[in-house]
Amino acid sequence: MTVSEGKFIDLSLKIFIFSGLSDVKVYTKNHFNYFHPSIHFFKKVQNSLIGARVHERVIVTLEPFEAYGDYNDDLIYTVNRTVENENCDPHLGQKLEIGLGDGRNKSGIVIFKDYDHLHIDTNHPLAGSKLMFDIFIKNISCVNQKNSHPQALNFEDDFNL
């Protein structure tokens, strides 16, 4: 049996995240249940799995534009500390939600602060990172033969970003 549309895949994967010049992080997930195809998995990774067999290894590399996009300096916002928020003293790295002034809010990370301002980066935590997936296919079955439910790959929750 091979990976194809409508198949339920049990796989293990290692994800190598290359950010900066030499920073590499590796995350491992031993049992990842995946229904093929899925809106919760990168299209290039899905396409690379088509035709793969049980006990086969598939390696796929995603450039930043194929994953979470390039890092964008325009997504760093400077927020003035005012009387209304002067008691807000977040630590560096803390997640905050800011209003964009048009009724929308955006989440970000405090990257710098001084007496008058907070600088909040709203880029995705993996923006600008190259990703390499090292996937091992453990089992392939038809959906009606499985009792478990497919999972979504959520980097922030699954890998504590």
Image: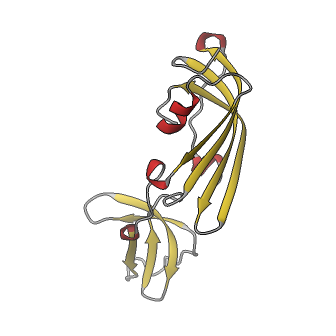
Q: Residue furthest bottom?
A: 115
* Left or right of residue 148: residue 55: right
Q: Position of residue 20 (x, y in %)?
A: 58, 68
* Numbered-mark total: 0
**Residue 71 against residue 150 in the figure, above or below:** below
Colour scheme in use: secondary structure
Q: Nearer the viewer, residue 152 or 7?
A: 7
Q: In the rendered image, which quarter contains the N terminus?
A: top right
Q: Position of residue 34 (x, y in %)?
A: 60, 28
Q: Quadrant of residue 4?
A: top right
Q: Quadrant of residue 50?
A: top right
Q: Please indicate, yes or no, whether residue 145 appears anywhere in the rendered image.
A: yes
Q: Residue at x 58, y 29 (%)?
A: 49
Q: Residue furthest left?
A: 102
Q: Residue at x 69, y 50 (%)?
A: 27
Q: Position of residue 22 (x, y in %)?
A: 65, 67
* Left or right of residue 97: residue 134: right
Q: Residue at x 62, y 18 (%)?
A: 2
**Residue 37 against residue 69 in the figure, above or below:** above
Q: Please indicate, yes or no, whether residue 161 appears anywhere in the rendered image.
A: no
* Left or right of residue 119: residue 31: right
**Residue 2 against residue 16 in the figure, above or below:** above
* Left or right of residue 48: residue 115: left
Q: Nearer the viewer, residue 126 or 111?
A: 126
Q: Nearer the viewer, residue 159 or 47?
A: 47
Q: In the rendered image, which quarter contains the C terminus?
A: bottom right
Q: Residue furthest top?
A: 144
Q: Position of residue 80 (x, y in %)?
A: 37, 81
